[in-house]
Image (cartoon, rainbow, N blue to C red):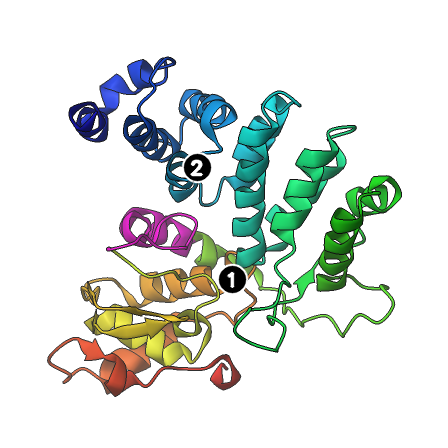
């Protein structure tokens, strides 16, 4: 089993089509490595194979977690594929998988994917147990057993009350699922919802700023995405997440200094310590740096202010004599309150 698992792990891309056809494997270790490899391929045939694998073996934590590791940014699409295969016969397998996908999406707190999972839940008809699994995953308000305080969750702003939510309110009857639905609904906000707070202010970009953002997207894709990933959630052992990071959304001079001269760990991002090194990217033009900064400050449902090339030019001149990569202590972790 260990040899087969290793073979799957090191198999070249040309063998992905063959990996997708593996159906009769019984060893959990091999299946877990297959789930990791296929979910990280980001190809339609591989996603289909992952969904089938999860529908057959999703009750096993190793297989399930293996698939979830490569699913970031595609949770809704994969959850939809698994839900399509879900039935009474494989509820034991598909229920935990849908719960897992919903949990990832709830933890990320992004409107688009969250609404996508609600749509899947509302479409399940009489497959009430699968719907309950999704609602259970989306409801992250469960108290920490070690604390008397409820978990603080970020409010998710939608453009309007989703039709899927209204449908769920009419169709969910199970007591526990109803409790989950109430918690999920309380976390959502939209203009006109009774008791909703004031919506966050998002300043529209000018035509020039939007063009700079698009240029920054290309720079990010070519230079940054391999480590920080297209979805911005980073990669274990390689790069921390950028999504909702104070290092991205805080004081822009800090981000500019990191790009220009690099950053040496350890550094705290969210609740985790990363002891890695980001190489300097000072060879980029001021416009390129401004573009990629604007991109990461507005992508992934961020609403940070844009950055222009003149600002980066000033930072480059101000710290031109700094000889080495920055440390977290030198930069002092920024806060969103300090953003300009």
Q: Which mark is residue 247?
A: none
**Can residue 296 be spotted in the picture?**
yes
Q: Position of residue 292 (x, y in %)?
A: 38, 60
Membership of 103 in magenta stretch = no
> What segment carries the magenta color?
215-237
Q: Position of residue 140 (x, y in %)?
A: 61, 59
According to the picture, the residue beneath numbered tag 2 turns out to be 64
Q: Position of residue 226 (x, y in %)?
A: 28, 47
Q: Is residue 233 above or below residue 133?
A: below
Q: Which numbered disc, 2 or 1, marks the residue closer to the eye?
A: 2
Question: Going by the image, does 292 lie left or right of 152?
Answer: left
Q: Position of residue 280 (x, y in %)?
A: 19, 66
What element does badge 2 sit on? helix
User: Residue at 12% across / 78% down in the picture?
Assistant: 324
Question: Going by the image, does 275 lie left or right of 145?
Answer: left
The crowding category of the residue bearing disc 2, from other C-alpha atoms within 10 Å (few below 14, some 14 to 19, many at least 20), is many
According to the picture, the residue beneath numbered tag 1 turns out to be 298
Q: Is residue 309 above or below residue 190?
A: below
Question: Going by the image, does 54 lie left or right of 32?
Answer: right
- Which quarter of the figure has residue 98? top right
- Which of the marked residues, 2 or 1, is nearer the chain's N terminus? 2
Q: Is residue 46 above or below residue 328?
A: above
User: Residue at 56% across / 59% down in the picture?
Assistant: 207
What element does badge 1 sit on? helix
**Can residue 117 be spotted in the picture?**
no
Q: Which of 297/56 is in front?
A: 56
CB-based contact (under 8 Å), mark 2 and mark 1: no
| Majority secondary structure of magenta residues | helix
């Amino acid at each position: 089993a260990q040899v087969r698992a290793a073979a799957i792990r090191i198999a070249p891309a040309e063998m992905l089509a063959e990996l997708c056809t593996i159906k009769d494997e019984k060893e959990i270790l091999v299946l877990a490595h297959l789930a990791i490899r296929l979910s990280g391929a980001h190809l339609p045939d591989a996603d289909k194979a992952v969904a089938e694998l999860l529908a057959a073996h999703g009750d096993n934590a190793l297989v399930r977690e293996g698939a979830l590791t490569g699913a970031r940014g595609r949770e809704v699409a994969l959850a939809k594929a698994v839900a399509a295969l879900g039935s009474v016969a494989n509820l034991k397998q598909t229920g935990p998988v849908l719960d897992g996908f919903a949990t990832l999406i709830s933890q990320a707190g992004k409107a688009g994917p969250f609404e996508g999972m609600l749509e899947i839940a509302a479409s399940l008809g009489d497959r009430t147990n699968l719907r309950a699994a999704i609602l259970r995953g989306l409801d992250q308000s469960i108290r920490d057993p070690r604390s008397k305080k409820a978990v603080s969750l970020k409010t998710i702003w939608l453009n309007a009350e989703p039709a899927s939510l209204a449908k769920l309110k009419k169709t969910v009857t199970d007591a526990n699922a109803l409790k989950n639905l109430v918690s999920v609904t309380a976390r959502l906000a939209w203009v006109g919802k009774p008791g909703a707070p004031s919506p966050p202010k998002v300043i529209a970009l000018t035509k020039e700023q939007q063009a700079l953002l698009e240029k920054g997207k290309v720079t990010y894709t070519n230079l940054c995405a391999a480590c920080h990933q297209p979805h911005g959630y980073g990669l274990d052992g390689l790069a921390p997440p950028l999504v909702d990071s104070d290092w991205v959304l805080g004081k822009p001079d800090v981000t500019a200094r990191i790009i220009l001269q690099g950053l040496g760990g350890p550094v705290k991002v969210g609740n985790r310590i990363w002891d890695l090194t980001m190489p300097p990217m000072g060879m980029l033009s001021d416009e390129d740096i401004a573009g990629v900064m604007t991109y990461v400050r507005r992508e992934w449902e961020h609403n940070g202010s844009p950055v222009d090339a003149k600002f980066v030019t000033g930072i480059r001149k101000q710290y031109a004599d700094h000889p080495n990569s920055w440390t977290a202590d030198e930069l002092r972790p920024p806060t969103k309150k300090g953003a300009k």
